[in-house]
Amino acid sequence: MPWNTSKPSDSVPADVALIERSLLRSFELHRLDPGRGEPPRVLTTTALKDHREPMERFMRIARGGMEALFGQVRDAGYVVLLADTHGVAVDFIGNPLFDQDWRRAGLWLGSCWTEEKEGTCAVALANLEQRAITVHHAEHFRAPNKTLTCSAVPIFAPDGRPLAVLDASAMESPDDRRSQHLVLQMVQSAARMAEDANFLHEFEHHHVLKLARRRDFLEVSADGMVVLDETGRIVAISQSLREQGALVAALGRSVEEVFDYRFEQVADAARQGGYPLAMRHLPTGTQCFALVRPPRRRPSAAPAQASSAMAGADALQAIAGHDPQMQTNVRQALRVLDKGLAILLHGESGSGKEAFAKAMHEASARRARPFVAVNCAAIPETLIESELFGYREGAFTGARTKGARGKIAQAHGGTLFLDEIGDMPQAMQTRLLRVLAEREVTPLGAEQPVAVDVQLICATHRDLRGMVAQGQFRLDLYYRLNSVTLELPALRDRADKGLLIERLLREDGQQLYGRAVAITEAARQLLLRHDWPGNIRQLKNVLRTAMALSGGEAVGPEHLPAEIRGGQPAMLPPERMLSLGGVDAETAVPGAPGGRDALLQALKAHQWNVTETARSLGLCRATVYRHMQRWEIVSPNRLGH
Ligand SMILES: Nc1ncnc2c1ncn2[C@@H]1O[C@H](COP(=O)(O)OP(=O)(O)OP(=O)(O)O)[C@@H](O)[C@H]1O
């Protein structure tokens, strides 16, 4: 069982690599001057208030941990800072005798420690890399910071989102960076205390299980915490469990399914003082122990509120399932969310790029604002400009009398998801680049630009770098879009295929029949062995059809399609095969018989309803749109939309 491994702390070679990368960014990306003399900027009281207000509740909870840490390091000449995710010191404890010196060094309430302004420094790196780090003396980028030693540790909110950074810094320290090892450990343990206290506070109305592999350690040092709602469903897990990927797949399941322990038994134990429970972690069959922390008050409206705040990050975790690559993706996604960076998702068709983008939006601070998805392959080239940028009345023939807001403006304040970005025409690439650089959009026919603030997430199944090499995709746009690229694994490569199948049978079964639908071992094995060229989309369709055929009873091999049952060669991915008159879509040329005609016929037969057409041809909508674009098929209703 993975949750009892303790997280490695400061590892010098890893630190060195991170620091080197940060130094490069400081020079090349932020174009900072290492010799600049003045200390870090300190915010005005009003500006600082904007940073402190959202952190107030956490600051109160963290204060005890900060003071305990300060008590440990004060005599060695350290100050303790709590910074928010923007690198602003929102709380500070230092020996008042040296106030002038701290202030001069930028170790002060309201000081800004970001890589963009200070270059390499510990608070910025802990925020960016989401790991504990020491930046010692000359490892700092700017000259005035080179006498400092700073050890910083990120702190996470109960839903796994970055929340703050705790830092201990000194103006004088031995040259050997190893002298800071213990300090970093102290900061780590204070950060974990604050994080756990915040977690327990957030879920004070819930039953919380403190888990440990060894009973003797349960009271003093649990390995992690699991939160149950009033029905015994697992609704949250603590950061220590998240970091190890442990129990992420348990989110949303009942305590009985995961720990072989009925919720009534847990509630009973809570009423009787929460004595240690001996449980079994069913997925691995390992024994573990739990102490129950009873809910502080009777659950009221609070649980629902807490669950909805958790829902976003948990949806992201649920999509990641138990696959290590997807777990890494979630960790990276949570790191970069709300940092104003564009994110690129790369993966085969049907691998869940849009689902991941939506979950990222839900997990972001923008979740209450719109999520607008645009499939660049789906819009004919002639219409993409007005669709994205909008237009004023009378901007072109066929334009609506009142004009239209483009998708970019519709996403203002929220997230813009550009699917199939590799299919965006070059002229549009240029315009998009300008929008990203200037953060404003000028609708067709308009003179005044409109300011837009969007989180951009793009997706593609193509090799954008290769497209750049062939001059099909703009290099500068490529750089802008891929500050972070997340690789979504194909279904055949996912380590958690079995669990995913179970989950889909449970969720879709619930929808179709009001309960989870079972599957025979023989059918499960066939599904596990299949190649899944259409990825999760294909798996979902196969399971839905199988459930319909089985009438909600256990799905057996007889309910699966022939190519899965008979071990026949798997279908080629939709990109490589289009069953339209046997024409290979990639090699088909506009006007080729069969492909274009067959698609046209299918579209007409379904009154130009692309979803229906796609379903009838066994393709995803994006592929149908791609072929419509390739073969220049435009829906007669298009301009009326
Ligand atoms: N982890 C997941 N668990 C359950 N369903 C999922 C998961 N990921 C994706 N899906 C479902 O699989 C289907 C395909 O996902 P999605 O549309 O996000 O893929 P995509 O990579 O964006 O595809 P395309 O590139 O063809 O647009 C959707 O019905 C989506 O809800």
Image (cartoon, grey):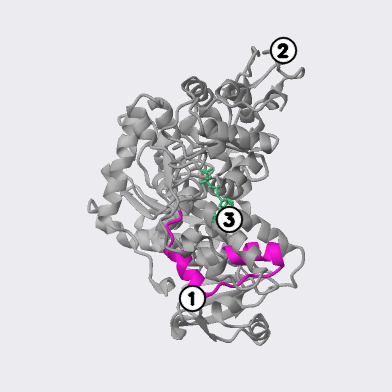
* One can see residue 94 in this view: no
In this rendering, the answer to whether 99 lies above or below 189 is above
Q: Residues within 10 Å of mark 3 (few under 14, many from 20)?
A: some
Read off the residue under disc 1: 283
Spatial separation of the CA atoms under disc 1 and disc 3: 26 Å
Image position of 361 (left or right of 423) = right
Q: Residues within 10 Å of mark 1 (few under 14, many from 20)?
A: few
Extreme left residue here?
Answer: 176
In this rendering, the answer to whether 109 lies above or below 464 is below
Query: Within the image, what quadrant is residue 293 found in?
Result: bottom right
Q: Residues within 10 Å of mark 2 (few under 14, many from 20)?
A: some
| Residue 625 in picture, x, y percent from top left | 57, 34
In this rendering, the answer to whether 614 lies above or below 444 is below
Which amino acid lies under the numbered mark 1 shown in the image of this protein? Pro
Which amino acid lies under the numbered mark 2 shown in the image of this protein? Gly
Q: Which residues are magenta?
A: 504-532
